[in-house]
């Protein structure tokens, strides 16, 4: 495999470990400065230049895009995607994860538990927002902050209002988030690669500091995750479109609360804490995926008019609850169930004998008219039926 790591820090621990792991496994690897690419849109096919010359062929890339160059970096990653070069982290995934508000919106839509969060801009809306998340103390977060910078604990409502007003006056966007007292100064970092957690550590803040980031003096220790934490981390990463990610979670009273999904997780702390070869796991995953790249169903799936993909939800108390999947007669109606989502668990190609439960979600492919008829009238406005007919196929260049 010929792999390119997109990084402006070739001497950093993470980049060096990835390079060493690739060489140890017999792969070719180059570290390429992301800012030295030029996107070529003049030819018949998408192309890239590096340091003034046409880029040679690569089997895969591993983006390590810094926060300060997100826009240009994701544009380069997107160009590699157009060139059918495999990347474990898509441009859309990196962009979405980097925007804390957007990430929260996406994860909340998919029922990922998070600390109660609000986003407002008008001064008059600040106090009601603080009350909605549970009152003081609250955590105030800059949307563009990293490594614990721009994260402030406000112990009182008036203090929170003053901080937010000051930040708004400097044109900063902030999130207002409930302070999870039972997890004060502690969080979990799970390193997700593909569909599993390859390593996990608990970060503990130093002294009275409530931020547990290593860059703020926090300490780390290896931790064996409960299955629900593993499932939550994997699902959060995959929802964001990331196959290599660091998922940060708080240990709430009722289970994991996702704080952030990091598209370029550092490896030094977690490898030191666990003694595991995380870099090697990342390289092995990429090598195994090169011949099976991610497929955007909306762009690649060639279907006939009238067919598409839809998500059917088994609502609490519905007549389907307690029945076997085969009793719904979906296959007789030319509908194939691709996956069954139950909480944080995903069951691929579910068998007909699977018994349905409240709030199960069935991702189906088949006749749109048939699937539409199965959506209760009162739920139809909220149903997400994505038409993939030829005349509605989105432009692949978008």
Image (cartoon, rainbow, N blue to C red):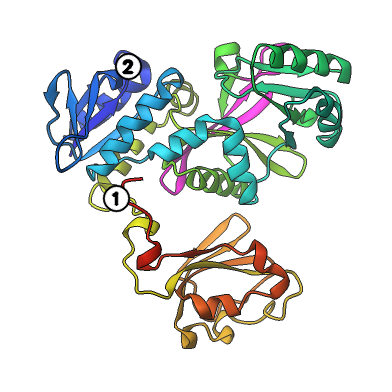
- Residue 2 in which image quadrant: top left
Residue under the image location 14 percent in, 38 percent down: 43
Q: What element carries label 2?
A: loop
Tell which of 158 and 27 is nearer to you: 158
- Residue 137 left/right relative to 110: right
Image location (x, y in percent) of residue 356: 63, 74
* Residue 367, image x, y percentages: 46, 78
Task: State the residue position of label 1.
Answer: 293
- The answer to whether 212 appears left or right of 8 in the picture is right
For the N terminus, the quadrant is top left
Q: Is residue 97 in view from this perspective? A: yes
Q: In this view, does 251 lie to the left or right of 23?
A: right
Q: Residue at x 77, y 31 (%)?
A: 180
89 lies above or below 20: below
In the picture of the structure, the residue carrying the numbered disc 2 is 8
Q: Residues within 10 Å of mark 1 (few under 14, many from 20)?
A: some
Figure quadrant of residue 164: top right
The magenta-colored residue range is 185-212
> Residue at 36% across / 45% down in the picture?
398
The quadrant where residue 138 appears: top right
Is the stretch drawn in magenta largely helix, strand or loop? strand
Q: Check disc 1 and report its element: helix, strand or loop.
A: loop
> Could you say which is closer to the camera, residue 172 or residue 287?
172
Residue 71 has which mark?
Answer: none
What residue sits 23% from the left and 24% below the top?
38
Instruction: Answer whether residue 196 is magenta in the image.
Output: yes
Residue 186: x and y in percent read 68, 25
């Amino acid at each position: 495999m010929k792999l390119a790591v997109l990084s402006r820090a070739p001497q950093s621990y993470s980049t060096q470990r990835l390079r060493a792991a690739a060489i140890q496994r017999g792969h070719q690897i180059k570290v390429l400065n992301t800012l030295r690419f030029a996107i070529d849109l003049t030819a018949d096919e998408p192309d890239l230049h590096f340091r003034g010359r046409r880029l040679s062929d690569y089997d895969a890339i591993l983006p390590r895009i810094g926060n300060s160059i997100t826009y240009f970096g994701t544009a380069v990653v997107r160009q590699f995607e157009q060139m059918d070069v495999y990347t474990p982290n898509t441009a859309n995934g990196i962009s979405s994860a980097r925007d804390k508000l957007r990430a929260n919106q996406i994860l909340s839509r998919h029922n990922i538990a998070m600390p109660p969060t609000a986003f407002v801009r008008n001064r008059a809306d600040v106090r009601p927002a603080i009350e909605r998340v549970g009152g003081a103390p609250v955590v105030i977060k800059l949307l563009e902050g990293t490594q614990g910078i721009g994260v402030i604990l406000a112990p009182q409502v008036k203090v929170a209002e003053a901080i937010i007003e000051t930040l708004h006056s400097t044109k900063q966007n902030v999130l207002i988030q409930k302070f999870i007292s039972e997890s004060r100064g502690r969080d979990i970092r799970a390193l997700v690669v593909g569909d599993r957690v390859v390593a996990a550590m608990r970060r503990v803040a130093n002294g009275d500091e409530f931020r547990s980031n290593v860059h703020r003096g926090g300490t780390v220790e290896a931790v064996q995750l409960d299955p629900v934490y593993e499932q939550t981390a994997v699902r959060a990463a995959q929802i964001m479109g990331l196959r290599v990610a660091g998922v940060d979670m708080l240990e709430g009273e009722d289970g994991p609360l996702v704080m952030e999904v990091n598209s370029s997780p550092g490896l030094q702390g977690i490898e030191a804490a666990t003694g595991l070869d995380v870099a090697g796991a990342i390289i092995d995953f990429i090598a195994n995926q090169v011949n099976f790249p991610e497929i955007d169903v909306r762009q690649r799936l060639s279907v006939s008019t009238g067919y598409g993909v839809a998500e059917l939800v088994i609502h609490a108390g519905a007549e389907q609850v307690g029945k076997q999947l085969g009793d719904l007669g979906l296959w007789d109606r030319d509908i194939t169930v691709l996956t069954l989502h139950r909480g944080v668990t995903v069951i691929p190609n579910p068998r007909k004998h699977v018994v349905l439960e409240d709030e199960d979600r069935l991702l189906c492919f088949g006749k749109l008219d048939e699937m539409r008829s199965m959506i209760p009238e009162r739920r139809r406005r909220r149903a997400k039926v994505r038409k993939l007919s030829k005349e509605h196929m989105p432009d692949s260049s978008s």
